[in-house]
Amino acid sequence: MEGVLEQHRSLHEERERLMELIAQEMVKKKAGHREQLNSDHRIRLMLDRYEESSNKLADLYEDKDGMRKQDISSLAANPFNEFYNRLRTLRDYHRKHPDEVATPLSVQVAAFARLGDGDDELLASFTDEESQGRYLDLHAIYEKYLNLKGVREALEEGKELDYYTYLKKFDQLFDIKKETKSTAGYREYISLLLEYLTDFINRSKPLVDLNAELGKAVTEFEGKWKAGQFPGWPKELASAQSGGQFNVFEFKTVEDLMQKTDLNRLKNALKALGMKCGGTLEERARRLWATRGKRRDEIDPSLLVGAQASLVRQDEEKRIAETEARIYRLTELLSEQRQDTLENVQRKQARTGQEREEEEDAADAEAAAHEDDDDDDDEAIYNPKNLPLGWDGKPIPYWLYKLHGLNINYPCEICGGTVYRGPKAFQRHFSEWRHAHGMRCLGIPNTAHFANITQIDAAVKLWEKLKKGKTAEKWKPDAEEEFEDTAGNVVSRKTYEDLSRQGLL
């Protein structure tokens, strides 16, 4: 049996080996999307193992059972006797288990680096629609959404909602009516949506720290919920919910409220708030006065009718809103995949049935060719025209290369001579950090006035011209400020001061 100090040493060694493997995995070149995804999953597994080892090591250092202290004391008292005792224990163990072979730690740790390496299988499973984590597959949840009570009624009125439109607005939960959100179907729908988004991120983005991201989302939600600013769940002041034209803020004191109202008016106002409406005039007035400047959830529950049911409803609403907050955060993390999914759906809708069949046949042929060429994956890719690589790690077709204008280079002097391939990358770079940094070094704001300007001289000249225009438009008090003399004549400020000094006014 290993001693405590040996366990310390083993865990420290394991952590160091894992750190080294993670660093090697991160710098290793990945040919395509499949290899990158498998690499991310390998890193995620190694990070989990690293965290597990660190927790064990922390428990050993805490030494709650006192074994570490006892082990150190025994070594300090008589190290030679302790050495031979442990050697005797090891020999006895191997004598009893002669055929047992221990796997070295280096072999155990190195096994992580070989997971999913060199085969066609991904370390995470995806549906055909998800295409190895590139696109979202919300068809089942889309069907669930169509069957929601409020949504179904809207569709019956003639409104149509196709899958493409749903992808664009599935995170706009604040537009759904509160009556629909109170149903069991809606709670099941958002639970399924949250579960799918969480699972998809774990499969397609294994290096994202979901616990930290969701923790931030919940923290922000608590602040907004308390302030009544969470979208889709407004909280109005209780005094504004009393119905009719009654407003507690019109009265200065409770006595003023008692003098200017009667029993029936107070009763109606309390009923509209769901509060107890019995008692004398003074009791009703004080009960209503207690709602002044408060939200519904801030009213004393003892004053409400069915207070326990009201509290349960508020807790349920808060749980639903918290689930929505988590969905909002996960949707932000998947913004890129969502946009790619929209483009993919739109592209599929534009194809004819024959084109879809041809695409499926081409995909099957490519998969078969990929299986036959597994042994040739390590060979150098033939790319004489230096075309960009696609998602599969192979050069894109030349017609696609020219279609996107990637054969045209756009140099930018402001970016330090960086050359951008294609008009799309060129237009996008004006809002990126490199161009903004170059403009900041020139002392020029990166505004829309300087769009498509790549030369430093042109940018400086335009900035000087803009500054002169602003100076010309600046208000000049000496020439534009008007004064009136005693005779009613309107003159400029300079003329007025000259006449005043000469005593001619």
Image: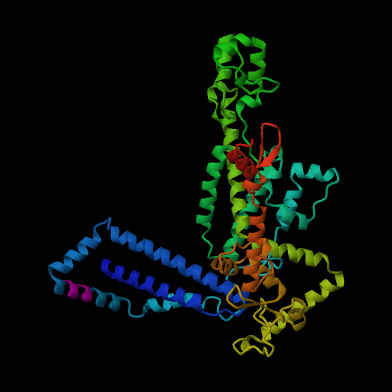
Quadrant of image for the N terminus: bottom left
- One can see residue 133 in this view: no
User: Which residue is painted at 46% across and 70% down in the image?
Assistant: 46
Q: Position of residue 117 (x, y in %)?
A: 55, 79
Q: Position of residue 33 (x, y in %)?
A: 62, 74
Which is more toward the observer, 51 or 178? 178
Rendered image coloring scheme: rainbow
Mark yes or no: residue 77 visible. Answer: yes
Examine the rendered structure and indicate whether residue 327 appears above or below residue 201. above
Q: Indicate whether residue 78 is drawn in magenta.
A: no
Residue 449's place in the image compared with 290, above or below, is below
The structure residue drawn at horizontal position 70% and vertical position 76%, both measured from the top left corner, is 422
- The number of numbered discs placed on residues in the rendered structure image is 0
Quarter of the figure with residue 304: top right
Dominant secondary structure of the residues highlighted in magenta in the image: helix
Residue 85 within the magenta-colored segment of the rendering: yes
Q: Quadrant of the C terminus?
A: top right
Task: Give the quarter of the image for residue 437.
Answer: bottom right
Span colored in magenta: 82-88
- Image position of 82 with respect to 494: above or below: below
Q: Residue 359: x and y, percent?
A: 79, 75
**Residue 444 at what x, y percent from top left?**
59, 64
**Depth check, front residue: 379 or 368:** 379
* Residue found at the very far left of the displayed protein: 77
* Residue closest to the eye, 268 or 301: 268
